[in-house]
Amino acid sequence: MKDELAMLLDRLDAMGITRRGFMGRAAAFGAATALGTTVMGSAARAQEPKRGGVLKMGLGGGETTDSLDPGLSDSPVPFSVNRQWGDTIVNVSSDGQIEPALAESFEANADGTVWTFKIREGVKFHDGSDLTAEDVAATFRRHSDENSKSGALGIMQGLSDIAVDGQNVVLTMATGNADLPYLLSDYHLLIQPGGGVDNPSAAIGTGPYKLVSAEPGVRFVFEKNQDDWNADRGYYDGVEIIVINDATARTAALQSGQVHMINRIDPKVAKLLSKAPGVQVTNVSGRGHYVFIMHTNTAPFDNKDLRNALKWAVNRQELVDKILDGFGGVGNDIPINAAYPLFDDSLEQREYNAEKAAELYKASGHDGSPIELLVADGAFPGAVDAAQLFQQSAQAAGIPLEVKRVPDDGYWSDVWNVKPFCASYWGGRPVQDQMYSTAYLSTADWNDTKFNNPEFDALLLEARAETDLAKRKDLYSKMAHILWDEGGLICPMFNDFIDAHGEAIAGWYEDPNYEMMGGWASSKTWFA
């Protein structure tokens, strides 16, 4: 990594780009992030896209309670729905580079405290109105408001000022943040007319498809946006998203030709499905992880000994073997793995240790009453089976873990981030700052473990402004150790994203950022 960075910096010197400017923009992802705007893998680029037809997607992870407000998007179907109609100002490509979207360019001052984004001209919203810099600023202000309950609140709280200067949006922070462009690629931050203040659920954006009808938990229909500013996407005449939460039914729909692509393939059937005629199964490793989350401010999980007893009571390798069937790897109770730059591999790896778990459980002074873990099939593929395996390994350590299975519908609104102990998943984020700011900063709305550690918060802010990669890695290492020891996260495994599509689909490429080509499957593929 160090040699590659030196070589790339030399190339940047030759191009007339200052090293300070580069470091301020590339930050934690290293030198590779500042170069190029790769949108597709080489294989996909070599094919000539064709236009026409209606794409049907069968997706798991949808509920009747789902909202079209992008700030409230919290599961796979809302994420994919919003990808159809909305755009952020920048995107992260499949190879980890920042690429322009509604912002055609950006630059930072020397210390990374002031960022200026030049907003693209000639872009129209689906209602025919023109995109302006004020729409972008208003969107950011809405997601910075605690009353919005936005999933992007944690990453927006670092902004001290949001201003408009002609066609530019100028963002000012109290401390520098070299990762800001990555943060602004967050899928909650879709730009809406007037910021979406008057009607955040209108689903009016600048995306490749326009919403025609919406039945949350059932079906969403879109038509091609004929005024799309980006000609290199949106090849279908229309898109239908059909919510199919049952994994078996979803697979059957693909095999029968009722849908053209599906998400969330059960790892236990992935290898078998790949042998089915006319079906292509794809998997890509990344930053996604399957977790059990404890509220650190709620009894009995406000007891550190109890939290750590449960962490040592998980047989991680067993879950990877039996739940992921090898499509993933062991986790270590932090949301960061080797897919992240500046990952610290010196952190002690927790292994299953029934004796240590029993000692910590006894030290916690817990009264022996059942410890209830809520789980649903839709929490992640194999979640119920994973919880039951966890129950068995915990009981072997004398911990009275009890699994309560609840319905999929309403899980993300009534259980996740509400109940003190449940199963969940995270798709990961492009950089560590975004992952930590979204889910572990004490003031983040999506702080689903209710983690509140002033030292951790201070280190996060310090790391944002640090452009020396070695020092920044050290700060992230300290944060990882704090979370590993103090946090309410049980992260037993990092999962591959496993999707499948029919042979009629062309242009598919791997994207480690999220399932379904990072959410771009409907935008970047076409019918062969």
Image (spheres, helix red, strand yellow):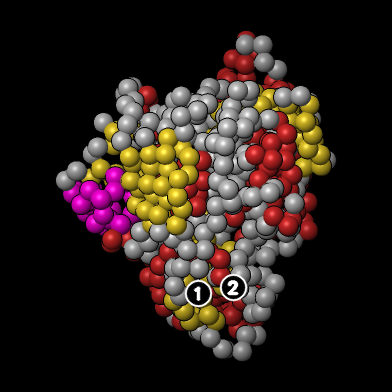
Which residue is drawn at the image coordinates 16% and 46% (left, top)? 277
Residue 447 vs residue 358, the one in the foreground:
447
Q: Upstream in the sequence, badge 1 or badge 2? A: 1
Q: Quadrant of the C terminus?
A: top left
Residue 519 falls in which quadrant of the image?
Answer: top left
Q: Would residue 273 be visible to someone looking at this image?
A: yes
Horizontal and vertical percent position of residue 505: 29, 37
- Whether residue 496 is visible, yes or no, is no
Kindly state the secondary structure of the residue where label 2 is placed.
Answer: loop
Q: Position of residue 72 (x, y in %)?
A: 59, 55
Residue at figure coordinates x 43%, y 64% from the top left: 378
**Residue labelled with disc 2:** 419
**Closer to us: 360 or 245:** 245
| Cα distance in 3D space between marks 1 and 2 | 8 Å
Task: Write the residue at 37% across / 53% down.
Answer: 242
Q: Where does residue 514 sit, x and y in percent of width and height?
A: 47, 45
Q: Are marks 1 and 2 in contact (CB under 8 Å)?
A: yes
Picture disc at residue 80: none
Looking at the picture, which amino acid does disc 1 mark?
Answer: Leu
The residue stretch that appears in magenta:
250-276
Q: Which residue is mark 1?
A: 374
**In this rendering, is residue 484 above or below 404?**
above
Residue 399 in the image: above or below residue 26:
below
Q: Quick one: quadrant of the N terminus?
A: top right
In the rendered structure, the answer to whether residue 395 lies left or right of residue 322 reads: right
